[in-house]
């Protein structure tokens, strides 16, 4: 059996504020008895620049470091959630910047494509 094919027990713990910790304990496979923890929070995100559209709630999941126990995850939940959310925001901004750079080259004018789909060479 491969490590990725392992089966695990899943236990979910949550509180009244909407924080949720999911514990996975590998029950079959080479990592048997190992516990992994995943946290989940609900984020309010603005999906539209239009102020008439209210923010929407989006679930956000993150992993806790390996080797930690449930008590540690519970005590450090907010810190780990904030850290993961900040990393996610940075990744989103970096991806948007790369996409913009890909669409518009440094000269500021996108290249004209010919009938074969390749950029045309400037004439002159």
Image: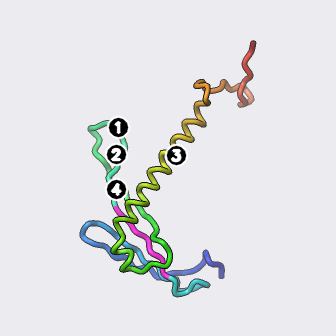
Quarter assignment of residue 83 = bottom left
Q: Which residue is mark 4?
A: 43
Left or right: residue 90 versus residue 17 is right
Task: Decide whether the magenta segment is chiefly helix, strand or loop.
Answer: strand
Label 3 sits on residue: 94
Is 24 on the left or on the right of 47, as rendered?
Answer: right
Callouts 2 and 1 close, C-beta under 8 Å: yes
Residue 49: mark in rendering: 1
Q: Tell me the element at label 3.
A: helix
Q: Position of residue 9 (x, y in %)?
A: 47, 82
Label 2 sits on residue: 46
Whether residue 50 is situated above or below residue 67 in the rendered picture? above
Q: Earlier in the sequence, mark 3 or mark 1?
A: 1
Label 1 Cα neighbours within 10 Å, binned few <14 / some 14-19 / many ≥20: few
Identify which residue is drawn at 40% across, 65% down. 80
Q: Compared to 1, does 62 lie above or below? A: above
* 108 magenta-colored: no
Q: Earlier in the sequence, mark 4 or mark 1?
A: 4
Write the start and end of the magenta stretch as one range: 35-41
> Can you say whether 111 is above or below 55 in the image?
above
Tell me residue 52's x, y (percent).
26, 38
Label 2, label 3: how far apart the Cα atoms are: 19 Å
Quadrant that contains the C terminus: top right
Residue under the image location 29 percent in, 66 percent down: 18
């Amino acid at each position: 059996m491969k490590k990725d094919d392992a089966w695990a027990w899943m236990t979910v713990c949550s509180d009244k504020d909407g924080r949720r910790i999911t514990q996975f304990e590998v029950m079959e496979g080479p990592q048997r008895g190992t516990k992994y923890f995943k946290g989940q929070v609900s984020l309010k995100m603005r999906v539209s620049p239009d102020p008439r559209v209210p923010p929407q709630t989006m679930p956000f999941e993150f992993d806790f470091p390996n080797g930690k126990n449930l008590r540690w995850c519970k005590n450090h939940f907010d810190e780990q959630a904030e850290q993961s959310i900040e990393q996610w925001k940075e990744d989103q901004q970096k991806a948007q910047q790369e996409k913009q750079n890909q669409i518009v080259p440094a000269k500021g004018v996108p290249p004209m494509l010919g009938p074969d789909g390749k950029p045309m060479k400037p004439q002159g």
